[in-house]
Image (cartoon, grey):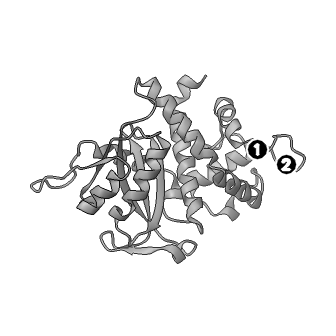
């Protein structure tokens, strides 16, 4: 049993909410050697600390057990499904429509590591070799979808796939996407319009210096800042891009559960 007191320990309320999403097999299945809750606690500890798998404390199940179960959860989109339902719930609680009509798109570059170096690219603007994570959030900052690419690929090249995926996940309700100046160009506008989404570029004033709070744009920046508090997402530590995406949805799930906990009882 995982030692009590780790910051990753899930309380009863949170665990009961997540259980239907994570129970790919019965909790008392004969092949299950460790309680699912202990495995979940171990995965949360990994996401918070960013430690190597071999350094997982002995209070948790063995690293190979946690790692293999995490891969099954990520492949089944368990945390992604939970994030989708939590987003609907949160929007309704804030008296918004269940699905958004506007989204905000942005990216950040994660430094590569020996594990992820085989799929990394060089970002000339950031002067960093790594992976770009492309995020789509609603106007409340809730994660809708994300994808990865080598850091040398332009942000605008991902617009078509991001808009198509976001439109499918929101039931075709999207009308507008707010982006920064990295997404300019007629080709990018046309790519978004194929998904019936109008791209609006929020420009920074040429006269402004230093940090400037841009309308709409600050929401996705806040979401990126929240996600970066999970040390597993500080660099690209994963051999597979699907694992990196999975850890992002896990982090988003934790953040949204904390936000909505007063209403889940």
The residue tagged 2 is 32
Picture quarter with the N terminus = top right
Tell me if residue 263 comes above or below residue 171 in the rendering. Answer: above
Q: Is residue 159 visible?
A: yes
Q: CA distance from mark 1 to mark 2?
A: 8 Å
Tell me if residue 87 comes above or below residue 2 in the rendering. Answer: above
Q: Where is residue 99 drawn, in percent x and y?
A: 44, 34
The residue tagged 1 is 36
Q: Which of the two residues, 42 or 154, is positioned nearer the viewer here?
A: 154
Disc count in the image? 2
Question: Mark 1: which secondary structure?
Answer: helix
Classify residue 37 as left or right of residue 195: right
Q: Are marks 1 and 2 in contact (CB under 8 Å)?
A: yes
**x 88%, y 50%: residue:** 31
Classify residue 83 as left or right of residue 65: left
**x 62%, y 44%: residue:** 8
Question: Mark 2: which secondary structure?
Answer: loop
Tell me if residue 254 comes above or below residue 246 in the rendering. Answer: above
Tell me if residue 187 comes above or below residue 115 in the rendering. Answer: above
Q: Where is residue 265 drawn, in percent x and y?
A: 61, 22
**x 70%, y 43%: residue:** 22
Q: Is residue 259 visible?
A: no
The image quarter in which residue 131 lies: bottom left
Q: Where is residue 178 drawn, in percent x and y?
A: 29, 47
**x 51%, y 65%: residue:** 236
Residue 152 numbered tag: none
Crowd class of label 1 (few under 14; some 14 to 19; many from 20; radius 10 Å): many
Q: Which of the two residues, 249 or 61, is positioned nearer the viewer here?
A: 249
């Amino acid at each position: 049993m995982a030692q009590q007191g780790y910051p990753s320990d899930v309380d009863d309320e949170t665990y009961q909410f997540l259980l239907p999403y994570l129970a790919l097999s019965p909790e008392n299945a004969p092949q299950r050697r460790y309680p699912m809750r202990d495995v979940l606690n171990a995965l949360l500890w990994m996401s918070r600390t960013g430690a190597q798998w071999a350094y997982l404390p002995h209070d948790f199940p063995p690293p190979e057990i946690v790692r293999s179960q995490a891969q099954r959860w990520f492949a089944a989109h368990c945390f992604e499904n939970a994030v989708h339902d939590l987003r609907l719930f949160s929007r309704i609680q804030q008296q918004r429509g269940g699905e958004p009509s506007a989204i905000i798109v942005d990216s950040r570059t994660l430094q590569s590591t020996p594990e992820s170096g085989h799929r990394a690219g060089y970002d000339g603007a950031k002067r960093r070799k790594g992976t770009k994570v492309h995020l789509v959030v609603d106007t409340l900052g809730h994660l809708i979808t994300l994808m990865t690419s080598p850091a040398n690929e332009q942000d605008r090249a991902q617009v078509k796939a991001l808009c198509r995926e976001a439109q499918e996940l929101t039931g075709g309700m999207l009308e507008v996407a707010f982006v920064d100046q990295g997404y300019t160009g007629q080709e990018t506008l046309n790519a978004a319009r194929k998904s019936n989404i109008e791209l609006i570029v929020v420009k920074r004033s040429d006269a402004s210096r230093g940090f400037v709070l841009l309308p709409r744009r600050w929401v996705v920046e806040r979401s990126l800042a929240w996600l970066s508090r999970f040390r597993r997402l500080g660099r690209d530590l994963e051999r597979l891009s699907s694992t990196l995406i999975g850890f992002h949805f896990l982090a988003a799930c934790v953040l949204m559960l904390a936000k909505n906990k007063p209403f889940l009882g």
